Image (tube, grey):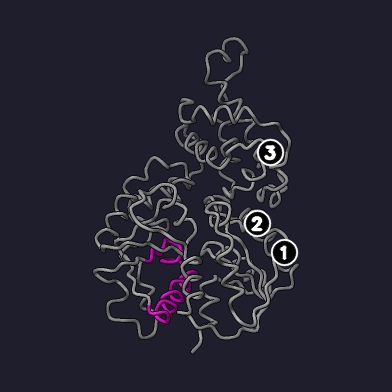
Amino acid sequence: MANQIYSISQLLQIQACTNCLACAEVCPAVAGSLDGKLSAVYRLTKLNRILKTRTGFWRKFCRIKEPTAEELRAFSDTVFRCTLCGNCRLICPVGIDLTHIWHCVRRDMVASDAYPGKIDMIRENLDESHNVFGEDNEERAEWVEDIPDAPEHGYIRDRADLVYFTGCVASFFPMAQQIPMALVKIFDAAQVTFTLLGEDEQCCGFPLLGAGLGDQLDGLIANNVRAIKAKEAKKVVFACPSCYRMWQEHYPHEFEITHITEFLNELIQSGRLALKELDLTVTFHDPCDLGRGAGVYDAPRDIIRSIPGIRFIELSKNRENSNCCGGGGNLEIIDAKLSADIARNKIEEVKATGAQAVVTACQQCVRTMTTYTRRNKIPVQVLDIVQLIQKALAK
């Protein structure tokens, strides 16, 4: 594909890399695999050479040959084995906006027909089923049926000022369905009137960005905006940081949007949620898309500290320096082993605190860390902050 996929600013930034290796030192994929070829510095070096082979000057006068199909596939392997956590962007001393460059590189690899075959599965699932798992989208709110004494309307109202946008993971993955089930109980306790979108909700589109298919977002965005307008809603709340970030950066700003940690913190501070004492020592894992991506750090900590009896210990790497759990960037689909290796490092960091539970604010983080602790019989409880609040709800 022509180099026009990259902005002039990005092309200049790619040239600006000083090979300082700072990005490699904080990369969760490098730490999990012990493979330096997964680092940002290696990827930028290779990318720079590929871009030059597409320019007549470099081909003619410097005799730089275009990469073979095999070389391009090898490069693509490093491109897609990345969680898009943003740690490299944060640490870069010359300020290269690496996260957005990685999105462009993935688009480039798709256009160059050098990408993992599972990208086609993501594309097909979203085209046909409008969710990343390929499930029947009519079942998106089926988890409500597992809530005792759920109202007859199943939390799907014709009109409401507030929409709870559930997201694919919490809608369809059994382990993560406990999070929306806990959240509606909290809403009921605080007398918050809201609505789900049910089958009218479609994937936010975040997996498409990670798959290098960002040019195919328009249909999903238009559908979700239309569905919320049909409810005459003014505000949308997200428990999934990736959905929240997606709406921040790629959706029209027609509604007030907030992450659930900010929304619930306001309910607690205003006295609308009464919390009982919990005898529990916890630490908090900052999700990449909520922290480095959306800049939300204080609200979840305020919530934890507002629960009587809780003992809170920070992880050694916290807030903007948080280590990824291994669940981002479609990595779990592309390379499940590497995703698990990154989760292993995360759980080892959690264990070092001595905490009984690790709390986070992301369904995918819960899923990734819980899968690792269960498979390896590690006695650390993994909770979404919504589940923690439900445990603390006063009777």
Of pointers 1 and 2, the one earlier in the residue sequence = 2
* Residue 39 horizontal/vertical position (percent): 67, 41
174 left or right of 217?
Answer: right
Residue 178 magenta-highlighted: yes
* Residue 203 horizontal/vertical position (percent): 38, 56
* Residue at mark 1: 348
Residue 116 magenta-highlighted: no
Instruction: Please give the name of the residue rendered at 61% of the width and 65% of the height, measured from the top-left corner.
Output: 369
Position of residue 191 relative to residue 101, above or below, is below
Disc 1 element: helix
* Residue at mark 3: 93
Residue 313 or 267: which is nearer the viewer? 267
Categorize mark 3 by other alpha carbons within 10 Å: few (<14), some (14-19), many (20+): few
Residue 322 or 40: which is nearer the viewer? 322
Disc 2 element: loop
* Residue at mark 2: 322
Q: What residue type is labelled 3?
A: Pro
Instruction: Please give the name of the residue rendered at 60% of the width and 71% of the height, measured from the top-left corner.
Output: 382
Q: Is the Cβ of the residue at disc 3 closer than 8 Å to that at disc 2?
A: no
* Mark toward the viewer: 1 or 2: 2
